[in-house]
Image: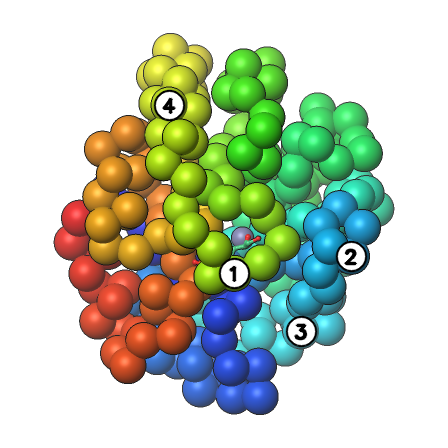
Amino acid sequence: MIKVSPSILAADFAHLMRDIQKVEHSAAMLHIDVMDGHFVPNISIGVPVVESINQNTDLFLDIHLMIERPQDYVEAFVKAGGDLICFHLEADCDPKEVIETIHSFGKKAAVALKPGTPAAAVKPYIKDLDMVLVMTVEPGFGGQSFLPQMMEKVSAVRSYAEELNPSMDIQVDGGINEQTAKTAVQAGANVLVAGSFVFRSEDPEECVRKLNRL
Ligand code: DX5
Ligand code: ZN
């Protein structure tokens, strides 16, 4: 089954709850991009915003950490209401330790791969993960074009999952719209992050429904 995770990076931050409410009935989860200005050259949302969102919605919160030291912030984002914590394999951390910390709080753990990181890098962790995020743009900014070359990586991660952890989710993030989502699903993705396609449209709810139907 396809799950859609609208990325609030493309929402209107001055009317954040209004925008979140537009997708509350159609989305499976809500994607929240956390950037520290070091791991990626941009700064976005932090702990207090996640806390406020959590107090105002029942949506499952999918936290995408684009930060240099994920280990230091897992607890804060869990306490703020994160249901799934995704960190980058390229960050300064011991991935096994970070996964264990996330699971020790009873939350779902995911690892993200930048476009330059090969699928093989995540293989040792597949057994322990709830999800792998294959980035389909360079992390840091919304509104970029989908990188079709990443589809081979999605297929490789799907074959690792079939062998080692069949219930694991595979997420794609970056440049997702109706067409690129179709390509990603065919390659083996089942969780679709979409920012601009959803929140920069006239009808965010219908955009999520279009992706749900794929
Ligand atoms: C980029 C973020 C994405 C971003 C996607 O670093 O991880 O979640 O919001 O935005 P679109 O869907 O506009 O490419
Ligand atoms: Zn993201």
Which residue is painted at 73% across and 54% down in the image?
A: 41
* Residue marked by disc 4: 152
Image disc number at residue 101: none
Residue at the extreme top: 163
* Location of residue 5 in the rendering, given as x and y in whole percent from the top left corner: 40, 57
Q: Nearer the viewer, mark 1 or mark 3?
A: 1
Q: Amino acid at mark 4?
A: Glu
* Dot 1 alpha-carbon crowd within 10 angstroms: few under 14, some 14 to 19, many 20 or more: some
* Location of residue 31 in the rendering, given as x and y in whole percent from the top left corner: 50, 59
Give how far apart the Cα atoms at labels 4 and 1 are: 22 Å
Colouring used for the render:
rainbow
Q: Amino acid at mark 2?
A: Gly
Image disc number at residue 49: 3
Of the residues under marks 4 and 3, which one precedes in the sequence?
3
Of the residues under marks 1 and 3, which one precedes in the sequence?
3
Give how far apart the Cα atoms at labels 2 and 1 are: 15 Å
Residue 97, compared with residue 145, is above or below; it is above
* Residue marked by disc 2: 37
Of the residues under marks 2 and 1, which one precedes in the sequence?
2
User: As rendered, which of 133 and 39 lies closer to the eye?
Assistant: 39
Of the residues under marks 4 and 1, which one precedes in the sequence?
1
Of the residues under marks 2 and 4, which one precedes in the sequence?
2
* Residue marked by disc 1: 142
